[in-house]
Image: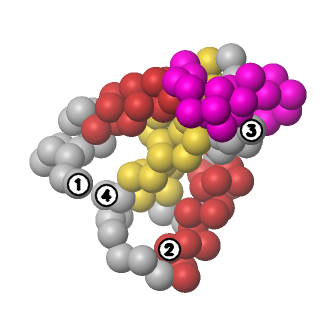
Amino acid sequence: MTISIQKDAMLSQFAVLAYKDKTYLNNTANLPPGWKLVDHEVTGPFAAFAFKNESTGEVFVAYRGTDGLGDGSADANILAGNWDPQLQQGMDFLGRIKINVELFPGGFEE
């Protein structure tokens, strides 16, 4: 992936979009041009969203960060260097995205 100010700006847009709900995200008019929501998981305080650019094939994953007092225990665990279930949920979501042949018909490359 090429790093640029434009790419950084787009990544920041997806970081903001991670705080929206699925109905909002399913409306492509609310996303950067050419992008669509292709997968998501919202379980308790954990939330992750995968977006795909239909013309380039790029896939971005955005995780919702601290979202209110309910995330206090997760933040405390992470700051203390302890394992938190949300870390595992994040890895599981990314793993599911990487093996999705509809998203990556030719396979995932790192």
Disc number placed over residue 37 in the picture, else none: none
As drawn, the residue found furthest toward the bottom would be: 5
Above or below, 37 against 22 in this view is below
Residue at x 48%, y 46% (from the top left corner): 61
Secondary structure category for the residue under label 1: loop
The Cα–Cα distance between marks 2 and 4, rounded to whole angstroms, is: 15 Å
| Residue to which mark 2 is pinned | 7
- Residue 44 lies left or right of residue 104; in this view the side is right
Residue at the far left in the pictured view:
106
Q: Amino acid at mark 3?
A: Thr
Q: Earlier in the sequence, mark 3 or mark 1?
A: 3
The disc, 4 or 3, on the residue closer to the chain's N-terminal end is: 4
Left or right: 25, with 2 as reference point: right
**Vertical arrangement, residue 33 with respect to residue 44, above or below:** below
Q: Main secondary structure of the magenta part?
A: helix
- Please tell me whether residue 74 is drawn above or below residue 1 in the rendered image: above
Q: Residue furthest right?
A: 69
List x then y, in percent, for residue 110: 23, 54
Residue, far front: 80
Please give the residue where the numbered disc 4 appears in the rendered image: 57
Q: How many marks?
A: 4
The residue segment tinted magenta is: 67-86
Mark 3, residue position: 66
* x and y, in percent, of residue 37 in the image: 52, 43
Please give the residue where the numbered disc 1 appears in the rendered image: 110
Q: Is residue 56 left or right of residue 14?
A: left
Distance between the alpha carbons at the discs numbered 4 and 3: 29 Å
Query: Dot 1: within a 10 Å radius of its alpha carbon, few (fewer than 14), some, or many (20 or more) residues?
Result: few
Q: Is residue 104 visible?
A: yes
**Mark whose residue sits in front, 2 or 1:** 1
Q: Nearer the viewer, mark 4 or mark 3?
A: 3
In this picture, is 46 found above or below 98? above
